[in-house]
Structure formats: C-alpha cells, structure tokens
Amino acid sequence: MHMLTMRSNQVALDAFEYGDLTIATDAETCSYQEYWYRGTWNDALEIYWRDLLKPGALVNRHYPREQGFKSSGWHDRDTGHIAAHMSLQPGETRSIRYVITWNFPNNRNYWNSEADSRAQTAGLKNAWKNYYAVLWNDSVASARYALGEWDRLHEATQLFKDALFASHMPPVALEAVASTMSVLKSPTVLRLEDGTFYGWEGVGESAGCCEGSCTHVWNYAQALAFLFPKLERGMRTANYRYNVDPAGGSHFRIQLPLGLRYSDFRPCADGQFGDVLKTYRDWKISGDTDWLKSIWSTVKKTIEYAWSPENPDRWDPDQTGVLWGRQHHTLDMELFGANAWLTGHYLGALKAGAEMAAFLGEAEFSEQLLAIFNRGKAWVDKNLFNGEFYVQSVDLHDYALLKSFDREGDYASHTYWSEEHGEIKYQIGDGCEIDMVLAQWHANLYGLGEIFDGEQVRKTLAATYRYNFKKSMKDEYNPWRLYTINDEAGTVICAWPEGRRKPMIPLPYSQETMTGFEYAVAIHMIQAGLVDEGMICIEAIRARFDGRKRNPWNEIECGSNYARALASYALLNTFSGFQFDMVKGKISFAPIQAGDCEFFWSLDSGWGKYVQTPTTREIHVLYGELSLTALQVRDEVQRVELDRQIVDFRRANNGIVFGHTLHLAAGTRLTVTLATDSELHE
C-alpha cells in the first residue's frame, strides 16, 4: 500500500476540530509530492499543472515541519498528492483503486448552547468519540482496513445488491426501497462512543436538523430495523434508559451527551406508543427475549402512563382504551379529544404489550391490557368512523376543554384558542388525515393482527386516496413548505371533502406532501388490496425525485436525507408478504403476485432470498444464518429438503412444523415441494 496522510497541526489531539485525512492506493508503483509549492495567490496551481505534465514520476517536494507558510493570506494550507503508475499495451484497460479515509474522532453537542453547562451539572463532559474512532486509531488504520478487506467487503456488498435488485416488484417500488437506504450512510445518522445508534430527523447545511433520535419520526422508518436490527434495538434501549421520566412519560428526544436528563417538553403520544410497537417488532425480528427483559419494566411503565394520575395530559385516566386528553404528535402540536390516529397507536401498544407480558409470565397485566384494548377498539370502530373514514371527535368551540389543561407556565388556552373565531386551533375535526389508520400499517408489518375493523380500514384508505391524493398541485393553496409544486402530484397530510367542516386554523402542515407519510399510507393501500392506488402514490413521489427535478437519493422534509423516508423499505415486505416471529422460529411469505417470483429478506441473524415457483418454495440464506422450527405455507406440502437432505415435518395450522430446529448457514437452501393435484387425490 502507498498512502499520504495529513493531520491537523494547530489543535490538540482531543480538540473537537482535530482530524486527519489519508489517500491510499494498493497500486504497485507510485510517486508522490508531500507538499505542493508554497507560494501566494495561484502559484501552487501553476506549478502543480507543470509538474503533472512532466513525463515520468512526480518529484517529491518537502518542507521542514518547523517551516510554515510565509504570511500571504492566500492558500496557506498545505496540499499533497499521490500518483499511481502503470504501463498499458494497445487496447488494454486497467483500473487503479484509491481510497480516501478520514478521522475526525472527537464529537460534542455543538448545537445546543446550554449543553456544556447541562453536562457539567450532571457530572458529565460534553465530549465523546465517534464510534469509528473506537475501531480505528486514525485514517491510516481505516485505509489499511479498507484496502486489505476490499475484496471481502465488495463481494458481500455485491451479494446484497444482487439479491435486493432481483426482488420481483414494480421497478419504481424497488427504486424507492433502494434509494432511501442512502439515509443510513448520510450525516443524518451517527454512532456514539459506546456504539449506540443516534439519528437526527434530517440534516441542514451545517448541522443536524431536529435532534434526539426523535421517536415520532423514526416510528415510520423500517430499513434499519431489518437491515441492522442490533442497531435498531440499541435505539430502543437508549430511549428507555435515558428518556423516560419516573412517571413513565417518554420525552421523545434523547439529549446528548448520553446521561443528560430528559427534555422538559411533554411526552408525545404517537412516539411513546410507537416505541412499544417497535419493541414488539424488534423482539420478533431477533427472538432476543433477554433483551426484552432488560427493558420491560420501563416499557410497561410507558404503557401505564396512559392512565397514570401523574400524567398531566390525562390521556386515558379511566382505562377506556381511547385517548381523550392533550396529545402531542409528530405534526408538532396537540390534538384534544378522541381520534383514531393517536388512539390507534395506543391500541397497538396495548395489544403488543399484552402479548409480551403474557410471554414474560405477567398474565394479570396481559389480561388487563387486552381488556382495555377490546374496550377501546369497539368504541373507536363504532364512534369514530363516519361511513367513509375515521375522524377526530372534538367540540371545536369548547374553550373549557382547553382551560382544563392549563397549568403554570403552560397554558393550553393561550396556545390553542382563537378568540376571533371562537375555536380550538390545529385540530382535524371532520378531516381525512393521512395517518388515521397508521397503527394498522404497523400491525400488518409486524404480525400483530387487527387494530381497527378491516373493512372500515379499507374504506378509509380508499377515501384517503380519493381526497388526499392530488394529481396536480397547481390549484392547491399551501401556506406551509412547498415539497410539491405546479403540476406535480402528491398525497397531502389532511383534506376536508366537500360538505365536511374544516377548522378555521386546521392541523399544521395539512397541505404539505412529506414522503415518509406518503410511503406509509401508499404501502397500507397495497396491503389492503388497493394496489393500483398505492402504486400511483409511490410513482408520484419518485417522479418528484427523478434526478432532474430533485436528488433521487435525498428525499427532503425538515432537512435533507430525512429519516421518515425509510418507511419505503416496507414496500419490500409488503410485496413479498414476509412475516416473521423469531421468538417461535417461524417465518412465512405470501407474495402479492402469483406464480414465479423472488424476494430479498432480512432478519437479525442473517439475510437471503425467497424463490417461488408453481411447485416449490425455497429459502436461501446468503449471509449469516437462520434457525427455523416452523414455516407457514398455504398449500399442501409433499416434501421438505435442506440442501437435498430430507427433513421430517408435520402439518399444522397454516403451515408445517419441523421435527427439530433447522439451522441454515450461509450458502444453504431449504426447499419445500408442494403436492400436485394428483397426489392430493391419492
């Protein structure tokens, strides 16, 4: 290897600004210049160009370390370069591999002016190392690793890419899945010194946008949970360890450095109950019950917070299964009164919590949660569905409702009352809101079952397409941010059909189109059988980010590389019909399309592909491993083979159970052969 490294020489090794950069190559023959010519104005570029055009190797230029620039004010930082040399025969092509590596090891909370004083008060230091600096001492070490492990890393990456892009999905859906994965390689995310995964909502030009692994935004993201499940579980662990108050309120934005007290801002209903749903998902993806046990007491407390007398927002004090109180949410304000959107998250948390509690031996708590769930579900299905879609039930003229939530320093009546209009501001009322049945989307993806009445959900999704999807934004007024313009299409956050009363000052961002919301509702449409409608919504998103109008790898919301766009990964599991329960060692596939197909899948222990033909079902493990005790298969099974070795099985409801746990290593294949009509007859 040949490499050239430059380091900061004006700051200490532990300074926030310290860093080093390396350019390296594994070419056999190289020449280099440690320094470009030190001159004024554009002298260095003039000499660089002359040096470059001279035949043969570069002649090194060296200045003693103690000799600095003469004070010129122009280009007074050093530059160096390295060149690879080769001989080519006529018509021959060769390539040279270079890597550029960097090491800026020291991090701190630079975006909050009070971070230093808060850290000092807590007995902490506002400083930590980036996780990569724990793995590699400097950019030289990471350059050696990159070049030394290049073939292995490239082979595994190519294997992943080929498996993903072989998935039988509409091309625009596959593009949506693959393109948004780039968020995970953007400055939106980082790993803290102990390896904890941390995410902004998005990034601005000079800093992250909206701190704290925000629970109500990362609720929508699915890619990390399936591609890097251990990192996703780390987000749950950190939130339950650092972000929940003694009463059980989750304050939804982790404060850095880790160990700082949670924010004083109120808990958020969709973020808090969404975390319970994600805990359920992550447990099912991994089968890691020890991990669940390690956080369960806090998970349990966050569910009970709904009816806790210490909850000043009085979500559900009588355990009705419906949220009635003041409910903060991802659109940055609060709803008052019953609504299917946030109550749906509550219902999902109750149902998921009941299953987890039962598994952990807390039968009484499980029964309590299930009883609350059943009461709430029945009430919501009966009282919040208007025949077309689910709504919010609130008297917009009820000033006393707001007054009941006033407390010192936090006056709901000041923030939410419009004196001129005699109305509560920022509510949905009779509107068709994009997330009204979002909890069912989560439940479908995680195998949790029914949260709302199935037929009413389908009608709600059909109404959302009918009213919220706009084929052209030309005639749509929008006082908020413009993510869709002119004749572009998109799905707006909230719409009020003709004949439905719209509040004078309605739900914030109602006229916006934000891709994470759009992906979730479009995928839910596909799950509900509204495939054409869902795909029209997906196509509209990707038409806006087509590479000519906008960056196809940067779907913006509140910042670039916005995390909510990672909801698009759910397209993959929806089209493949992938379901999983690694607690029981069971998976299944039910592709939307019939006939021959192939899909990528990924879980905690490994990833691979599913291949379906009219007579066989194959599960290939391409990386890692997979342990299975059962497989859900709709059809009658004739034979099961693991790498051509016959496997004992017995038929069970909706599938087969193996005689013993099967351990599939990388490179192995499980083949299920279906019985033909003649065999069934015999």
Image: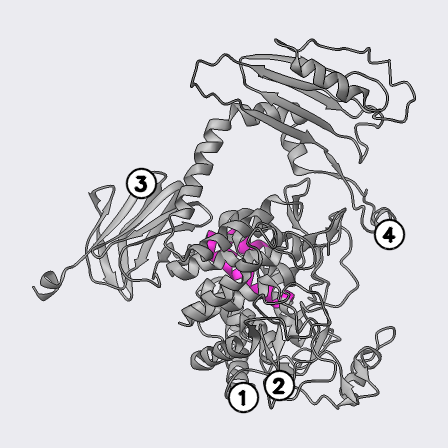
Q: Quadrant of the rendered structure where residue 14 is?
A: top right
Kindly report the distance in space between the C-alpha atoms of the residues bearing marks 4 and 1: 48 Å
| CB atoms of marks 4 and 2 within 8 Å | no
| CB atoms of marks 3 and 1 within 8 Å | no
Q: Residue furthest right?
A: 71
Quadrant that contains the C terminus: bottom left
Residue 598 in the image: x percent, y percent? 33, 52
Location of mark 2 (residue)? 430
Does label 2 or label 1 sit earlier along the sequence? 1
Q: Secondary structure at mark 1?
A: loop
Residue 165 in the image: x percent, y percent? 41, 47
- Along the line of sight, the residue nearer the viewer: 39 or 23: 39
Q: Which mark is residue 668?
A: 3
- Along the line of sight, the residue nearer the viewer: 326 or 102: 102
Q: Amino acid at mark 1?
A: Asn
Crowding at dot 1, Cα within 10 Å, few <14 / some 14-19 / many 20+, comes out as: few
Q: Which residues are magenta?
A: 271-294
What scheme was used to colour the molecule?
A: one colour
| CB atoms of marks 2 and 1 within 8 Å | yes
| Left or right relative to 122: residue 317 | left
Crowding at dot 2, Cα within 10 Å, few <14 / some 14-19 / many 20+, comes out as: many
Does label 3 or label 1 sit earlier along the sequence? 1
Does label 3 or label 4 sit earlier along the sequence? 4
Residue 178 lies in the magenta stretch: no
Q: Quadrant of the rendered structure where residue 573 is?
A: bottom left
Crowding at dot 3, Cα within 10 Å, few <14 / some 14-19 / many 20+, comes out as: some
Q: Which mark is residue 589?
A: none
